[in-house]
Image (spheres, rainbow, N blue to C red):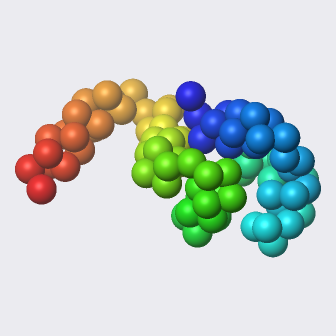
């Protein structure tokens, strides 16, 4: 599941409108719609606020958000899997 899909799922399950969340994030509704569709990336601060507004685990949202960012960076790279394995090994060491 992608970040935008999760946001939409949470928003709809709580009966909230895009414009309500957009107003809380101080962005316009079309921008919020693009975030839900994965056409725009939310800022980290927006992710943190969305976790509060949607009453969900901040770490879960941050993980999805970060995974989407990493994917966008490596999706067209031929050696993406090998690079990600190297990163994973480096992260495990810390």
Where is residue 55 shown, x and y percent of the image?
62, 52
Task: Say which quarter of the image contains residue 15.
Answer: top right
Q: From where the camera sits, is residue 26 visible? A: yes
Lateral position of residue 91 relative to residue 58, left or right: left
Residue sitting at x 22%, y 34%:
85
Which quadrant does the C terminus fall into? Answer: bottom left
Residue sitting at x 61%, y 60%:
52
Task: Say which quarter of the image contains residue 6.
Answer: top right
Lateral position of residue 73 relative to residue 19, left or right: left
Which quadrant does the N terminus fall into? Answer: top right
2 shown above or below 26: above
Task: Say which quarter of the image contains residue 48.
Answer: bottom right
Where is residue 66 shown, x and y percent of the image?
46, 49
Lateral position of residue 15 relative to residue 77, left or right: right
Q: Residue furthest left?
A: 93
Residue sitting at x 49%, y 33%:
75
Q: From where the camera sits, is residue 66 visible? A: no
């Amino acid at each position: 599941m992608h970040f935008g899909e999760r946001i939409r799922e949470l928003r709809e399950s709580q009966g909230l409108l895009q414009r309500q969340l957009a107003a809380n994030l101080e962005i316009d509704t079309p921008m919020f719609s693009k975030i839900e569709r994965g056409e725009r990336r939310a800022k980290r601060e927006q992710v943190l606020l969305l976790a509060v507004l949607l009453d969900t685990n901040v770490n879960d949202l941050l993980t999805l958000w970060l995974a989407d960012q990493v994917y966008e960076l490596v999706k067209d790279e031929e050696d993406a899997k090998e690079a990600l394995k190297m990163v994973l090994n480096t992260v495990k060491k810390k």
